[in-house]
Image: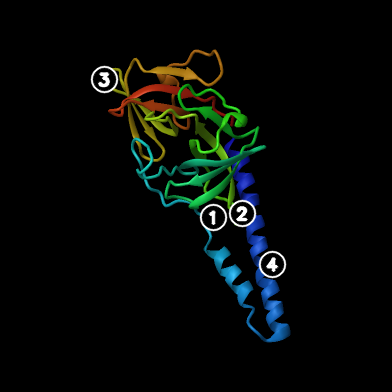
């Protein structure tokens, strides 16, 4: 799954860089012919250069996520949030209010082969047609996006249908999962967030009937993690790892 998105994002960035280069060449040609500064083109180049195209985050860490707190930035995964501005075929428009990545409208491509759109309460798949304008969502994206206005990227995960005052799950990649003397566990995510997991914590596989246990959560596992009001993990959904 990760290999697909890295290739996809690399291609998107290359297109943006080539487009920027073409604008610069066109401006240089115009100056040679007229000997005058092309102010509008120069302004466009400056704007594109300053746009958040390559690096969408600065590595802030958060503990138990929610609006108004610091945004979670993983090695290749960033969490943004905000209300839905519109839903089209294969795309969600979101007003990003997370304070990270590009502020304001972002177009989220939803790939059938890559993206997951899940219910915040039970972790089940949700159809795009069931997402409402104005609904608050979380989206996990990569660090690269196009230089278009509004910018565009492909979502890895969208968490939606979040009830009022409900603590939405975190989508984490596991760095380590260690059992303690009392048989509880400590889950450390790749962004440095540490979760305390009781020995009787509910754990389920994603959309299979396979039996999974807490010791099946290992380094590089992808999980949805629900926490209670004191930060203790109450439920985990474990995603199958891609074969090497």
Tell me the tag on residue 54.
1
Asked if the residue at tag 1 contacts the one at tag 2, i.e. Cβ–Cβ closer than 8 Å, the answer is: yes
Q: Residues within 10 Å of mark 2 (few under 14, many from 20)?
A: some
Q: Which of marks 2 and 3 is nearer the N terminus?
A: 2
Work out whether residue 58 or residue 167 is closer to the camera in this orientation and state it: 167
Q: In this view, does 140 lie to the left or right of 183?
A: right
At numbered mark 1, what does the secondary structure look like: helix, strand or loop? loop
**In the image, residue 44 above or below residue 201:** below
Q: Where is residue 89 in the image (x, y as percent from the top left)?
A: 67, 37
Q: Which of marks 4 and 1 is nearer the N terminus?
A: 4
State the count of labels: 4
Between the residue at mark 3 and the residue at mark 1, the CA separation in whole angstroms equals 44 Å
Q: Residues within 10 Å of mark 1 (few under 14, many from 20)?
A: some
Asked if the residue at tag 1 contacts the one at tag 3, i.e. Cβ–Cβ closer than 8 Å, the answer is: no
Residue placed furthest toward the left = 182
Tell me the tag on residue 181.
3
Q: Earlier in the sequence, mark 2 or mark 1?
A: 2
Between the residue at mark 4 and the residue at mark 2, the CA separation in whole angstroms equals 14 Å
Q: Earlier in the sequence, mark 3 or mark 1?
A: 1
Asked if the residue at tag 2 contacts the one at tag 4, i.e. Cβ–Cβ closer than 8 Å, the answer is: no
At numbered mark 3, what does the secondary structure look like: helix, strand or loop? loop
Q: Which residue is drawn at 44% across and 50% down?
A: 100
| Mark 3 or mark 1, whichever is nearer to me | 1
């Amino acid at each position: 799954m990760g290999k697909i998105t890295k290739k996809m994002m690399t291609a998107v960035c290359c297109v943006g860089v080539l487009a920027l280069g073409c604008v610069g060449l066109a401006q240089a040609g115009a100056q040679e012919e007229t000997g005058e500064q092309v102010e509008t083109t120069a302004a466009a180049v400056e704007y594109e250069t300053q746009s958040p195209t390559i690096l969408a985050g600065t590595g802030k860490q958060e503990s138990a996520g929610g609006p108004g707190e610091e945004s979670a930035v993983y090695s290749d995964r960033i969490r943004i949030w905000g209300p839905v501005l519109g839903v089209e075929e294969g795309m969600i428009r979101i007003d990003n209010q997370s304070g990270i990545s590009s502020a304001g409208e972002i177009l989220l491509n939803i790939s059938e082969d890559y993206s997951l759109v899940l219910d915040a309460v039970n972790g089940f798949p949700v159809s795009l047609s069931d997402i409402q304008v104005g609904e608050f969502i979380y989206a996990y994206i990569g660090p690269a996006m196009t230089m278009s206005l509004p910018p565009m990227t492909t979502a890895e995960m969208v968490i939606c249908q979040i009830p009022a005052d409900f603590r939405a799950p975190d989508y984490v990649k596991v760095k380590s999962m260690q059992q303690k003397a009392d048989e509880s566990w400590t889950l450390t995510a790749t962004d440095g967030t540490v979760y305390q997991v009781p020995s009787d914590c509910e754990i389920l596989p994603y959309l299979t009937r396979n039996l999974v246990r807490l010791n099946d959560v290992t380094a590089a596992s992808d999980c949805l993690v629900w926490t209670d009001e004191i930060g203790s993990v109450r439920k985990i959904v474990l995603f199958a790892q891609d074969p090497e």
